[in-house]
Amino acid sequence: MDFGFTDDQRDIQRTARDLLAERATPARVREHAEARTVDQALWRELSELGWPGIAVSEEYGGQGLGQIELSILCEELGRSLAPVPFLPSALAATVIEQSGVQAQCERWLPGLASGETVGALGSLSGDGVAELVIGGADAQVLVLVDEDGTGLAIAAEDADVTPLQAIDPTRSAARVSVPDGAGESLGDVCVGLGRSLISVSSELVGVCERALEMTVAYVKDRKQFGVPVGAYQAVSHRCAQMLLDTEKARSTANFAAWTADADPERLAEAAAMAKASASDAGREVTAGAIQMHGGIGFTWEADVHWLYKRAQLDAALLGGAKRHRAQLSAILADKVAASATA
Amino acid sequence: MDLTFSEQETAFRDELRGWLAENKPGPAPTEGDDDTHYAYRRDWQRKLYDAGWAAPAWPAEYGGRGASLTESAIYFEELGRARVPMAANVLGLLLGGPTLMVWGTDEQKERYLSPILSGEEIWCQGFSEPDAGSDLASLKTRAVKDGDEWVVTGQKVWTSGAQYSKWCMLVARSDSDVAKHKGLTYFLMDMEQDAVQVRPLRQITGEAEFNELFIEEARIPDANVVGGVGNGWKVALTTLMNERAGLGFALQIRLRQLLDDLIAKAIERGTYDENADSLAELHVRCESIRLLAWKGLTDVERYGQPGPEGSLVKWLWSDTNQRLTQLAVDIVGPDALTSGESWSYELLRARGNTIEGGTTEVLKNIVAERVLGLPRLKVAV
């Protein structure tokens, strides 16, 4: 029983954090957010380092590492809000690799692993339309999943892609519509979808962690009535609550990441727990960050709102907390029924 | 990250599970008074002791098994899973013994440890006072040196098992002229003397798990000082740090069982769908508690000290147990509001969870100050 990362995993985490602290500085993130542009130089650098293919198998040009390693990168990129299409592209690769036939894997994965191809993952709301696909405007391949757990892959040029201005400007977004008969079926995408939920959850954990760090630094520094506001329990207890929410989300995200490779039978349950927990935490913790920053937190100039906006998009991505609790409640009912008949 | 047990840990679990299956006691007596119930727990401890399962975490030289932290957690998980009662001398086993192992003299260890383990001598904890709850170091019970004895006068509260106890872990003020944390001494007080009066403290469930102690010039020999005169705060912290270490795992399993019972009940009564969202949220919380408890253990094994998880786990557990028992009122219906029914008992008992062993408010302060490094508000004295 060991909840810690291995030495190799800690190395990945440290290297990623150091690199992003240097490259994805708040000023750089702001510049791209305000211009709504991808940081192409950073994306190239990350691609050269092999990040986009970290969990893609070696036969398709990736590094063949597991969900834990992918989750570590997602968390670090969430912390930094780096304006690169890493998460959408990784989600698309995950679903294609888990569900696609060999020809589909051969067609898309090498490009996604090298970063030359950018992908995105969206949910179809019926009639072949995905209303809000994060990263959709930059993607060359779109993976779209249905409510019933089936999916399709489609090249961007074969779909109708209408760019949207989502509230999170650190990544592009688009409305995607699939013409009748276009795209290739990926069949049952449940495993890829479960893993995708974990990646999104890990990114949310990183967002929460950063929001809490910024808040703690601010309330230690900001004085009112002659003392740092962080000394008031109304403030410090909210910060404690933000930590609890973050750690709760982290515990379920890490558990799910471990489960994906080590105990796949529990993947659906663990992924639903992780996403329910992280979606709630993302909203609560980043809202707390704005509130604890007071007036400054409501200004465009302070950086906390970027975190809030990212959290809102991620919390909704592939379904919010309520949907995943509904999923979980169905699994729980089945378990009770099974143990009753056993 | 590897969330599976090692071969040795699995063997430990299987041995214990097998033993519990063969030896666990029948259901607790529903007839009879507190004494009957206590006798039932004392018999159970004797059975554990005879089989070498009373305190596996204790080193072998003191009659334990030298179990690792993980094995110790497994021990409490398995006891919880088997739904067995708590050993009668739980405070001696979890708090008193380990405190003596750190601070006791060789003579004290020789004299006290063995009867703790066998349950022959029961221990209780005399820390809190009517005016010293969260601010424990402000306690007023006085200890005055008289020859080679100490004369102790004061009042203690929330002392569970006092009526059955031979020894009390007592913290008293031995010096009023120094800073409040510095004037305290930790004693082992013989409860079998007229100067110590025990009065049951009736709680909102109607029963009396706890007592008040009225101490009027009780006598304690100098040999019963633990850890040196004036060092009581440090010794008391050792006791308090042991308080949550193991027990958390038993509580966590108990919560899980209550939730499984509640889910089954909701399905049975046809109200599962309308409560599905709340039940799923409780499931997520239960799993988080389990995961955070195990993570805390990993940190202790790796870094030698607990991370912030201890306070977070207790906070999350107590809050979750209250939500669960409150939801049970909606799901179970009138039984949960009828005196004497188990769900109504759980509902009322849960109110104590966010107070006992550190209030949620104090836990939030601990998290804010020691984990997040926020400044402490200076209160005018």
Image (cartoon, coloured by chain):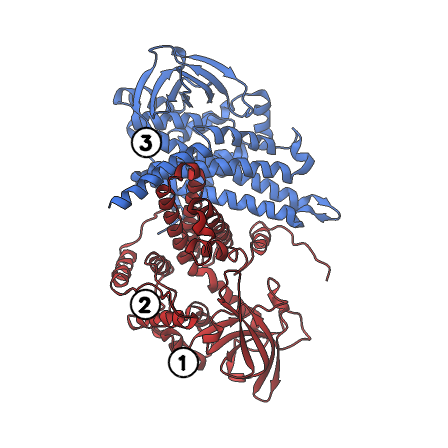
Q: Residues within 10 Å of mark 1 (few under 14, many from 20)?
A: few
Q: Residues within 10 Å of mark 3 (few under 14, many from 20)?
A: many
Q: Colour of chain A?
A: blue
Identify the image quadrant of residue A104.
top left
Residue A67 can be seen, yes or no: no
* SS of the residue under disc 2: loop
Of badges 2 and 3, the one in the foreground is 2
Q: Residues within 10 Å of mark 2 (few under 14, many from 20)?
A: many
Instruction: Tell me which chain the residue with mark 2 is part of.
Output: B
Q: Amino acid at mark 2?
A: Trp
Instruction: Tell me which chain the residue with mark 3 is part of.
Output: A
> On the rendered structure, is B123 left or right of B355?
left
Any mark on residue A191, and which? Answer: 3
- Which residue lies under the disc numbered 1? B110
| A235 in relation to B27, above or below | above
Which of disc 2 and disc 1 is earlier in sequence? 2
Q: CA distance from mark 3 to mark 1?
A: 59 Å
Looking at the image, which residue is at 60% across and 34% down?
A304
Whether the residues at callouts 1 and 2 have beta carbons within 8 Å, the answer is no
Looking at the image, which residue is at 54% across and 31% down?
A24
Looking at the image, which residue is at 45% across and 51% down?
B336
Q: CA distance from mark 2 to mark 3?
A: 43 Å
Residue under disc 1 on the same chain as residue under disc 2: yes
- Which residue lies under the disc numbered 2? B53
Q: Amino acid at mark 1?
A: Glu
